[in-house]
Image (cartoon, helix red, strand yellow):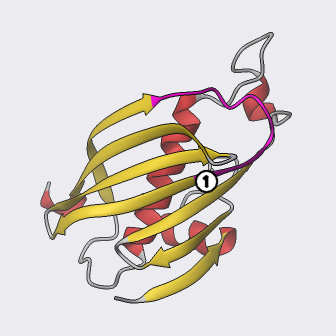
């Protein structure tokens, strides 16, 4: 089990090919390559991207929370040299949302890879803000080379 303490935005962009303004992770730490990690995103509700979600109420969109979970998951997976594929497709997702993110500050996506093979993998993620569970998701991916 290879442990890598953390990776920064520059490395995340290199691994995933996702660039700003669509990158929703600043750092990933607590990484066990191919197994688990924690994505950190500094939410700025003054961002142009977030200002337009609701006209009169600033809130972090659920789609960005899902994207943060997904970006953290694929970064941890793509760090693993044992995976024979470097691009995957989302087969299914199931998400739950418990509280809105209505203030700026850091949110944390803790992810675990549950099962993997050359055909694909399953993962779970939970987002926290101030140690409070905000949202969670279950994700199934498949190897895009299998199409």
In the image, is residue 99 part of the stretch drawn in magenta? yes
Residue under numbered circle 1:
108
Q: Residue at x 52, y 28 (%)?
A: 98
Q: Where is residue 17 in the image (x, y as percent from the top left)?
A: 53, 63
Q: Position of residue 26 (x, y in %)?
A: 69, 61
Q: Where is residue 112 in the image (x, y as percent from the top left)?
A: 37, 62
The answer to whether 65 appears left or right of 114 in the picture is right
Q: How crowded is mark 1: few (under 14 residues within 10 Å), some or many (20 or more)?
A: many
- Return the residue nearer the eye: 14 or 98: 98
- Residue at the farthest bottom position: 2
Q: Quadrant of the N terminus?
A: bottom left
- Return the residue nearer the eye: 60 or 50: 60
- The image quadrant that residue 99 belongs to is top right
- Return the residue nearer the eye: 79 or 84: 79
Give the extent of the magenta segment: 97-108
- Residue at the farthest right position: 46
Give the number of callouts.
1
Q: Which residue is drawn at 38% across and 41% down?
A: 137
* Up/down of 135 relative to 97, above or below: below
The answer to whether 116 appears left or right of 107 in the picture is left
């Amino acid at each position: 089990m290879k442990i890598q303490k953390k990776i920064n935005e520059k490395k995340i962009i290199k691994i995933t090919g996702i660039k700003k303004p669509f990158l929703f992770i600043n750092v990933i730490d607590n990484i066990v390559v191919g197994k688990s990690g924690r994505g950190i995103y500094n939410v700025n509700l003054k961002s142009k991207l977030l200002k337009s979600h609701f006209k009169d109420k600033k809130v972090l969109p659920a789609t960005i929370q899902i994207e943060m979970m997904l970006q953290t998951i694929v970064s941890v997976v793509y760090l693993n040299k044992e995976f024979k594929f470097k691009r995957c497709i989302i087969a299914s997702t199931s998400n739950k949302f418990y509280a809105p993110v209505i203030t700026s500050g850091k949110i944390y996506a803790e992810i675990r890879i549950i099962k993997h093979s050359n055909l694909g993998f399953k993962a779970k993620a939970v987002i926290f803000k101030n140690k409070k569970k905000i949202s969670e998701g279950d994700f199934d991916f498949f190897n895009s080379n299998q199409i």
